[in-house]
Every structure is written in C-alpha cells, then in structure tokens.
Image (cartoon, rainbow, N blue to C red):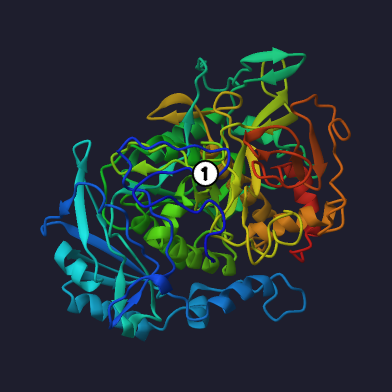
Amino acid sequence: MKKPLLCAGFAVGILTASCTGNSISSNGASPFLPGASVPASTERIPPGWAATATKAIPFKQFPSAGVSDKTQLHVVVGLRLRDGDGARQLVRNQRTPGNASFHQWLTPEQFTAMFSPSRGEAAAVANYLKEQGFTQVSIEPNNLIVSGFAAVSHVEAAFHTTIHGTTVNGKAIYGNVEPALVPVKLRNTVLAVLGLTNAYQMHTHIVKSERKFVPMTAGTPPPCLEVENGICIGGEYGPPQYQVAYGATSCPTTCSTGSKTAIAVMAEGDVKQVVTDLRTAEAFWGLPSVAYSVVKVGASSSDTSGLDEWDLDTQISSGFADRLKHLYVYDTTSLSDSDISLEYSRWVSDNKTQAGNSSFGEPEAVAYADGAMQTDDELFNEAASQGMTMFASTGDSGSGCPVLLNTGAPVGGTPQVCYPASSPYVVAVGGTTLDTNANGNEPGTYYGEHVWVGTGGGYSAFESAGYWQGNGICAVCTTDSIRGTADIAMCADNNGCPMDVFISGTQTGVGGTSLSSPMSMGVWARLESNFKNNLGFAAPVYYGVYGYYEPCPLKSTKCVPAGEPGDDTSAAPPDTTAPIGGFNDILFGSNGIPSSAGPGWDEPTGLGSINYYVMQQDISNSIFSGH
C-alpha cells in the first residue's frame, strides 16, 4: 500500500476531471465520492485520539442533517497485521526454491499465529466497543476484524466522528463527515472502521446481450449469429462451447477436470434460486451435478437483484471446470464494503476452497477512502499465503470505473481502475471478444480474440505491483510503485460471445467481465486438480509461465515479444493473437485511450487469455512455481 500516484481522486464534494482524456460532469447528485486522500499526518487530530485509514466523505457541502439515533449501524473494524512486511515476504518465500517456506501453504491458524494481531489485542478492541454501547460484538477467527452493532450516537462517540444523512431518490443515505479516529491506546491495532456510510456500494459487472436471443432445446448446441468466411461471429455459447474454444477438450493426453478442487462464488442477498437454476443448466448442457453449499455470512437479505450475476458465476465456473469437488456460494447481506470484508474474512478463515470469485467492484478511490482496500488487502494476503486465489472482474466501463450509489443510481465513470481487481493479491480478469471457427452454424475451435471495448484495465493509483508483475513483464509496474490490471482475460463481450445463462429458468444471453472472471476460476480449478491442488496463489504461477516463454530478456527495454500481426496465427485482424506459453497474447483493440492491446502484457487483457491444453503442459515451467 502507498500514497496515491495517479488520478487519485476529486475535489471534495465536486467532481472534477484530473486525468488527460477523461471528463466527468457533476449534476448535483454526486456528493458521495471520496475526496482526494489526506495523509493522516496532516489531519488535525484531537489529543488522546489517533487516525485510522477511514476518511471523511464530503456530505458537509450538501444539505444534510443528523441521522436518527434509532438507526443501528453494523460497524466492522479492520485490525492491522502485526507483521505486515513478514506476511508479504512470505508469499515470495513460498515461491523461492531452497527457502524453508517453499510450497508450504499456511493454515489459517498458522497465519494468525505468525502475522495477525494477538487475541488479546483483538479483545481490547472488542472490549472498547462494548464499553461504548455496542452489542453483538464478535471477533473473526483470524483476529483481523472485530464487528458489532450500535446506535448512531454511540458510533459517533466511539470513533470521534459525525454522521450526517440526506435523502436521494426517496432513500435515506448517511455517512461520516469526519474521519474515524480511535483512542491512542488502539492506534497500533486498528486499521480502518467500515460501516459508517451506506452512500455507495460495489456493483456487479454483468451486461445483458443486446442481440436477438435464439432459444434452444436441451442437447442442441447454441448457434452462431453470423458466419463469415467460416468464422463464427457473434456466437452464443454454453460451458461446453467455451471448453472447446479454449482448448479444454483437446489435450494431447487427457485434459484434467476440476474434480479434485473446491471453489467459491462471493454473493449477497437471497440466493435460494441459484441452485435451482444451476441444476437446470447442468441438465441442459449434459454436465454432472456439482456438490453445492451456501455459507451464510451476516444477516439474511431478501435482495434478489443480483440473481443473474450469481447464476452466471456458478454456471460458468462449474461448467468450464466440468467437474468439481465442491462449489460454495458465500452469501452476505449486501455489496457494502463492510459486508464484503466480512465475507472475505469468512472465506479465508474457512480455508475450504482453492479459489474464489468476485464479479463486482467499485472505484478504488472509494475503497481506499473508507479503509476497505487496506482491510481487504490483508485478507487477500492471508489467502495467498494459504495457497488460495481470488479472481476479480476488472469492470465493464472501459478504462473508467463507475460509482454506484446505494440507491442504484450510477454516477458516471471515473478515471481509475476498479477494486478489488486492483489488489496485488487478486487475479484481475479483463474481457475479450472471442471468435471461433464455425462448425456448420455452431461455435467451434479457437480462431482468435481482440479486446472487448467495455473491459476494465489500467493502472492503480494506490496499489503496488507484486514481485511477479514487477519483474519487467509490465514495463511500468514495479514492486514499490504501480500495479497494473488486468492480469489475464477471457471472453466477456455481451454481444460477440455471450453465454446462455439460466436465470429463473429462462435462457438469457449475458456477458461482461462477470463472465470472464468466473470462467477463469473454472480454468484454474482444472489446473489445480491436475497438480493435486498444490499450485497455490495463481498470479505468480501465471506470470512465471509468461516469464519462461517470453522471448525478450526480462526487464529489457529494447525488445518486444514476438507475435506481430500475422507472425504466429492465421487469424486475420482484429483477431490476430500470438501464442506465448499457455497464453493467447491479444494484439488488437482498446478499452479507451491510452489502454490499447499490443504484444506482451497490456492493460485491457494482461498476459492474454488461457489456452488450456497448452497451459496444462507449460505451467510446470513457471519461473515462480517450482512445479
């Protein structure tokens, strides 16, 4: 974590464009974006109090009033790793042959003992909350989160803040207009205080197809919507068609399935319909029924607005994997930062799966300003040390990431990447337009790809690159400065290669990076099963494969990868791609200036998409793997 470097934020309360090539307008309905970050050392802090990572949100410049004390807030307090440097170094040591930690993935108990605050330190925070009138106070097993409920006045007193409210589109919105502070005795323990605002939330990255959908009957492959010179353009796909397109059915020996691997989908709201739709999809596509469980996190919710997302996530991840050991749906109360942090904490503490998927996000300045970025990065660091991988979609608004108010109203795109995809301990998945060789009037084998114009991707203003990305593969990414997204990419075009998803029993064409991210988790499940679940965190493995097959010396500034248009494939522009190890390097397309694809790593598509049958062979050569 570091101070903002690029296009970090906005003038408090007023949207202003601060990056070349981007423009943002204010219509008076956007008082909820975080202001430019103010380092804690410059804030005026009263004696006896200490700063946290949670900044104020700019309600003060707009009509507002105090919030009724009858309002109960669920506050999630993120605690600081006792040895953050050691936790980060461990992830590198686990990839260093000869190191005592090489391939030694930790248990949650081991991570907690080595790096987390002590139980006594967590108890001190819990006792403080109880003294301040909080109820239902609980400590997460990893000692990284303490949570509880309290009336607004108790929350204000506990964190020396003020909470104001207003009404937007008939819905009450509140937020802390002063930064959250803690008593000095807790300064080295408390990292952030989440749950002080409900102004904005994460949003799902799913886009419905705009093309006329062609319903099918069971056993009938989906059609190409257009065939041109033998190429399926704008085809519809199901999991079996993606398997064929990305080489998961054509291995020289046997293609592994995900049968030995468990995965998780991060979700919220009422998910009862999800398993029904999953079983419908499995029967339709002729796939085996996966073992399925829901893990409840927090209070139940009747919200069903995310059903299409959770249907997509479960159907494509398990469908591409073909078989799984188990599919878990982690189900929390809402997409607020506080609820999502609790969900991540439960996921890493359970340690039941090798991978998880988050098909949602928010502008990283939002996550940074309320402290969710700092809190969640610790949880993702724990996941990596335990050999777990979180995949996250980079967004569907091109190089900008829109803010979504808690009322459901968007507040435009912003010149910044989405979080959690920007976390270095997450595999950020971008999107492509996939074209295949037509098999009659059906999608067939891989032809080529280009950038899907809607995909997210760019450079973080807050995060640093992991050592695996900062070794020269991403020219401007370094371990002490810039994190670049995406890491990899798969089909996401809602019109060019949409998936037929069963939503409440009805076939619906959908896309977005909400498709590419869980598909990537399905790919990883197959690879993990092939290597007996010993691959660990995926990002170093993937970058290590690229580093081995990269034709240029690492850190070279005088060489670009092979694969200029037409060199390595028969695909015609714009679908020309170049094979580098198990990757299809995407060479054409843009998600907004200056984010354009080209030879090597790029912002919209990262290292490229996965050619499974090649990757299953080449992954053993990863320079950061040791397999």
| Element at label 1 | loop
Q: Is residue 50 left or right of residue 364?
A: left
Image quarter in which the C terminus is found: bottom right
Which image quarter: residue 54?
bottom left
**How dense is the environment of label 1, judged by Cα within 10 Å: few (below 14), some, or many (20 and up)?**
many
Look at the image and tell me whether residue 104 can be seen.
yes
Question: Residue at image x 46%, y 47%?
Answer: 361
Residue 256 in picture, x, y percent from top left: 70, 48
Rendered view: 607 above or below 452: below
How many badges with numbers are in the image? 1
Residue 13 in picture, x, y percent from top left: 34, 49
Image quarter in which the N terminus is found: bottom right
Residue 363 in picture, x, y percent from top left: 46, 48
Which image quarter: residue 274?
top left
Look at the image and tell me whether residue 144 can be seen.
no
Q: The residue under label 1 is which amino acid type?
A: Pro
Residue 349 in picture, x, y percent from top left: 45, 67
Question: Residue at image x 42%, y 74%?
Answer: 41
Rendered view: 535 above or below 600: below
Question: Residue at image x 64%, y 39%?
Answer: 490
Q: Which residue is mark 1?
A: 415
Pick the residue in front: 463 or 209: 463
Pick the residue in front: 463 or 319: 463
Which image quarter: residue 227?
top right
Rendered view: 448 above or below 11: above
Pick the residue in front: 260 or 449: 449
